Amino acid sequence: MTAPGLRSAARLVRAILVGNPNSGKSTLFNALTGLRQKVGNYPGVTVERRTGRFRLADGTIVELTDLPGMYSLNPKSVDEAIAYETIIGQAPGSGLPDLALVIVDASNLERNLYLASQVLDLEIPVVIALNMLDIAASRGIVVRAEVLQKRLGVPVVPIQANKGRGLDRLRAAIQEQMRHPSIAPRRWGPPEVLEGICRRIDQGWFDPYTDLDERVHFSQSLRVLTDEEALQEWGRRPEGERLQGLVREGREALAQAGLDWRSVEALYRYRWLAEVAREATEQRQVVQETLSDRIDRIAVHRIWGPVLFLLLLALMFQAIFSWAEYPMQGIEALIGWLQEQTRAHLPGPWLASLIADGVVAGFGAVVTFLPQIMALFFFIGLLEDSGYMARAAFIMDRFMSRLGLHGRSVVPLMSGFACAIPAIMAARTIENWRDRLITILVVPLMSCSARLPVYTLMIGAFIPERRIAGVFTAAGLVLLGIYLLGIGMALLAAWMMKRFLVRGPAPVFLLELPPYKIPSLRQVLWQMFDRARAFLVEAGPIIVAISIVLWFLATFPVSREVIDRYAALKAVAPSEEARLELERQQAAEQLEQSLAGRIGHVLEPLIEPLGFDWKIGIALVTSFAAREVFVSTMATIYSVGDAEEDAPTLRQRLREARDPETGRPAYDWLVGLCVMIFFALACQCMSTVAVVRRETGSWKWPLVLLLYMNTLAYVVTLLVYQLGRALGA
């Protein structure tokens, strides 16, 4: 087989990367593939699929697929089921992989080897990457890779994924396995009666009635014998009754032998794995308390844990503003220069205006906020890679469980800070449908990165640069408050839904707390650039398209009466400053008479009680395509007819905007706050609505989402604005 786009001599090997959660799997994937990777969905499902390529010394191209983390080949969630189907070659568009790269956490050896032993049963070439040896050593545990290799019968390579150590040896082991594959015999010693039953199930059903590769027949026979869900899944196929009969006979035979069909596999595997672990490890010293334990005295403390979490959030948001200010100014200057060059060199005033004021201004208005988005992803990456994110989830669960929300909901909610779409998909790990549904419906209340440009625009325009307590600024604290508002409303909405949709106590929350480690700067930066790139790729086309449409709506129809009247006034203007002021007035009047202005005026009576005018009304409508389009909409509206070389920024234009009837500022800090509140609570993302439709299989729940979130946003914003004005703000 030849890789597309490569020389015909290059051999392509299809490999999978398998491992437990928190074993360093994604870190190893990034270290091996670097920039040669792509992200998509598995065919037919909305589960993220990452594939990448790397080259071996002999020129072989390895196409590596990073599978969702799993603890065994007995899947309990949709993500695990997709990973499992890929491993056995049953996923759409795939066959049995050429090689399995299994990553094993040396500090949790026995548990990680359980999955590895199941993969070995598939009789495909396997290479084991032994990771986190440094963490094991900190606990006084020495793991001998050569002993593991002898006992398992496949290559075992010590690595340190976060620092890139051992990767050359790992590539060499993969190359050797593909040249001279070594298939390990089944070494975990299933009893003879179990072997015989699996052979009968294989010969009686899997061999004649399925197209599975014969190498995975034993694994599947064992699975249907010991897992009722697997039996029901396969039993729905043609001749499924025959399979159920064979399994019943097998379970009766196990009972006669004094073995429980539910636990026989785990019993014999762990008995063998315990022996392997004892032989391969040495406890050189007894560590009474690890560094992670000492840190967790505070990090997960009932009182100090939440305090530390809030402090970290406050510092994170403060840094977002402090670090990003100078890059933002540079991007704004570059966008202004591009607009100037476009107007100067493109032929025809309408084409120049379209490109400069529609495309460049619209896309540039969002790109300006990329430094804040990258800073946010940078800090999230630090929290994830250090091991603190799991503690944050643990801390939040204490509050959420009192509201009756499933503990596993914490991870999707935390992911919602980046983007609601993968966060909603992450809710698939919640086995109970009703708890999963509630999580899906409240995740969009978490302030995603698409809201950040709106927040930073309003804060930069209307929140004064005031320092508080000598450390924090008003801007950082306002941003923190908006994020906390989303969290609070999500918890309140979950509590309300729990009372109507689900009754009874929440299931027990089980979450693994990985040991703390020094974050890999390379890994964090890679994640930051990858997520920022995805943000631009997904938002860019929508923003450009919306900007062009908005330019048209804000430009046409052209009023000849307005043009002629202002041409006469400018002809007798006493100064250049007066002429420029007349041009601004002309642009404002033309905009008000355009199609966009007419749409805004229709909406104005509905949103005026919120402090919003017709211009914000236009932006609210277009932002349903994507929340960040609000910024490009306002930028397009305020750049129409603007031909000044030194054009003011969007923040300046918002501050300088005047009510044409009263002459007072059109916007102030209260209006800016209300815009942020509305965006924090409203459902304004078509992609989110689409993925909710996909995950729930019905239009009912997306409509519920739209109704309750937008009603909540309107009511809360209305109360804040009217109360603020009543108090004299």
Image (cartoon, rainbow, N blue to C red):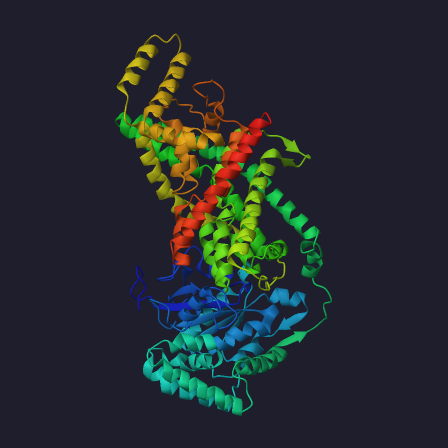
In the drawing, does residue 608 fall left or right of residue 22?
Answer: left
Q: In the image as oriented, which residue stretches furthest toward the front?
A: 500
**Figure disc tally:** 0
Pick the quarter of the image with the C terminus: top right
Q: Quadrant of the N terminus?
A: bottom left
* 167 to 110, vertically: above or below: above
**Taking 492 as reference, is 178 above or below it?**
below
Q: Quadrant of residue 60?
A: bottom left
Q: Is residue 274 left or right of residue 343?
A: right
Res 519 visible: no
Residue drawn where x is 51% and y is 47% of the image: 445
The answer to which of 160 and 298 lies nearer the viewer is 298
Residue 521 in percent (x, y) is at 55, 52
Whether residue 97 can be seen here: yes
Identified at 55% across, 34% down, the residue is 720
Image location (x, y in percent) of residue 432: 50, 64
Residue at (39% x, 83% y) in the render = 243
Q: Nearer the viewer, residue 295 or 462?
A: 462
Q: Is residue 5 above or below residue 607?
A: below
Observer-nearest of 282 and 411 = 411
Q: Position of residue 16 (x, y in %)?
A: 43, 68
As drawn, 50 above or below 320: below
Residue 417 point in image, percent of width and height: 52, 48
The quadrant in which residue 232 appears is bottom left
